[in-house]
Image (spheres, rainbow, N blue to C red):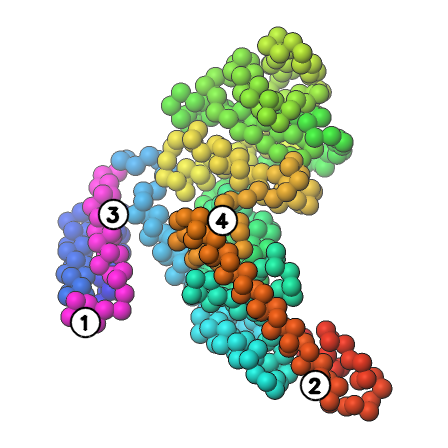
Amino acid sequence: MQNRALQWVARALRRRERWQSARAADCIRKAAELSWAGIRKINEGHSRSGTLKRGLTDSFLQFSMMPQKAGSNPSGISNASDMEVEIHNMREKFLISVTKLVESKSYNSKVFSKEKYFQTIKEVKEAKEKGKKSSRDYRRAAKYDVISVQGTERLIEATHGEHDRIRYYVHKEELFDILHDTHLSIGHGGRTRMLKELQGKYGNVTKEVIVLYLTLCKQCHQKNPAPKRGLAPKPMTFKDIDSRCQIEVLDMQSNADGEFKFILYYQDHLTKFIILRPLKAKQAHEVVSVLLDIFTILGTPRMLESGSGVEFTNQVVNELNEVWPDLKIVCGKHHPGQGPGSLERASHDVKNMVNAWMQSNRSRRWAEGLRFMQMVKNQLFDVSLQQSPYEAMFGFKAKLGLYSSHLPRETVAVLQTEEELEIAEEQLESSLWIRQEERAEVGADRSDMDEDLDPTAPEAAEPSTSQGAPGLFCW
């Protein structure tokens, strides 16, 4: 009944898109009748979830708030309900594709169905508790661990004593939300960036499932093509951070955010670390005001270059020297197309980020989002650096509060106080120590088993605990 009600909501949405308001209203009334019939059934004792009434009521409220006339939404910005419907459709399509992937794979597929996931947890626990273990039990115990945090059991990659490196296994029903949240958090990053972001925390988020997700992201397909690079320029080398920095003033007048019509783009050439700030005008004194904030935090470069013109760059440097007499900076020679990025490339990348941010946040106030876009850009893995610009600048990865910790996502989501955090961390640590002790016992048992198999064989006299008896175990 819930599915039928949601189908009527979907029909109403399609009617609304075609401006058939009367027929859309009929559809929503039909959905309401089905939903309240379902709610009455729940109240009669057949409740399996408390989400039906809330979900359908939210749908009706969202529908009622949708614009019923063309032009009421800012151009290119989807309203809340459209976005939610789009995400729902993406999730459904993704789940269908992943299900086909799982069914087409061999038994050793890294992608778990929900049933297989919990079955594996059960098998791992049983394998560790058995006195006499089979080769399959040893494989399970060597590959997986099970931890329990606040009553929730999670399957993880065997840590082998490395408590600072926990990688979770997830089932297919969890994959979409993990991929979607990560994709948005890195500014609609592609396959390589998503894989780099996810592989440190998850043991079975593969390239295949990432590609499946990316094929469903409409915003990624709508991105403007990157400007052609032409011939590869001679690379510019720098030895010190802040040795040479680049400033660009990007024109946003066609998409102004109130009084803000430009964006200051500042980049350190060595680390590719960027800073973005909104500007009201392309004037030297306004740029200098922002640069002073940057320099008093990160330090000052020796050379400042720009593709915005030699005259403008000289004005900025001269005003800097006037405001800060003890500071001496020279104008660097601008090398079009060289360094971390030309003006054209920088403008293209930033405007793509701005458009993606406005779509995701359903807002045209891009000036408020520049700091977040800056954070995302600086955390993206860079192939030439073999790390992110943030790591290159500061020497360690950026952290996003508790979501950067080893705690499970569902645990982090409900934590409110320091006491709750301490309890969760203690439970995680305790669970890891217990698993380590069990693993040591498994190793000892397995060594005994290896010796008992062929005590007269010279090769088996001192078997390797980590490798097992040759030909018996496939790890």
Q: Gap in Å between the C-alphas at discs 2 and 4?
A: 43 Å
Q: Gap in Å between the C-alphas at discs 4 and 3?
A: 31 Å
* Three-letter amino acid code at the position of disc 3: Gln
Range covered by the magenta-colored residues:
42-70
Instruction: Say which residue label 1 marks.
Output: 45
Where does the image place residue 337, in percent across and percent down from the top left? 67, 30
Q: Where residue 62 is drawn, which disc sits there?
A: 3
- Quarter where residue 456 is shown: bottom right
Q: Is residue 211 left or right of residue 234?
A: left
Query: Could you tell which of marks 4 and 3 lies nearer the N-terminus?
Result: 3
Where does the image place residue 238, in percent across and percent down from the top left? 75, 30
The nearer-to-camera label among 4 and 3 is: 4
Q: Is residue 365 above or below residue 110?
A: above
Q: Is residue 58 above or below residue 368?
A: below
The nearer-to-camera label among 2 and 1 is: 2
Q: Where residue 402 is drawn, which disc sits there?
A: 4
Q: Where residue 449 is drawn, which disc sits there?
A: 2
Q: Residue at x 24, y 56 (%)?
A: 54
Most distant residue in the right direction: 458
Query: Could you tell which of marks 1 and 3 lies nearer the N-terminus?
Result: 1
Query: Could you tell which of marks 2 and 4 lies nearer the N-terminus?
Result: 4
Q: Are marks 4 and 3 in contact (CB under 8 Å)?
A: no
Q: Residue at x 24, y 52 (%)?
A: 58
- Quarter where residue 29 is shown: bottom left
Q: Are marks 1 and 4 in contact (CB under 8 Å)?
A: no
Q: Are marks 2 and 4 in contact (CB under 8 Å)?
A: no
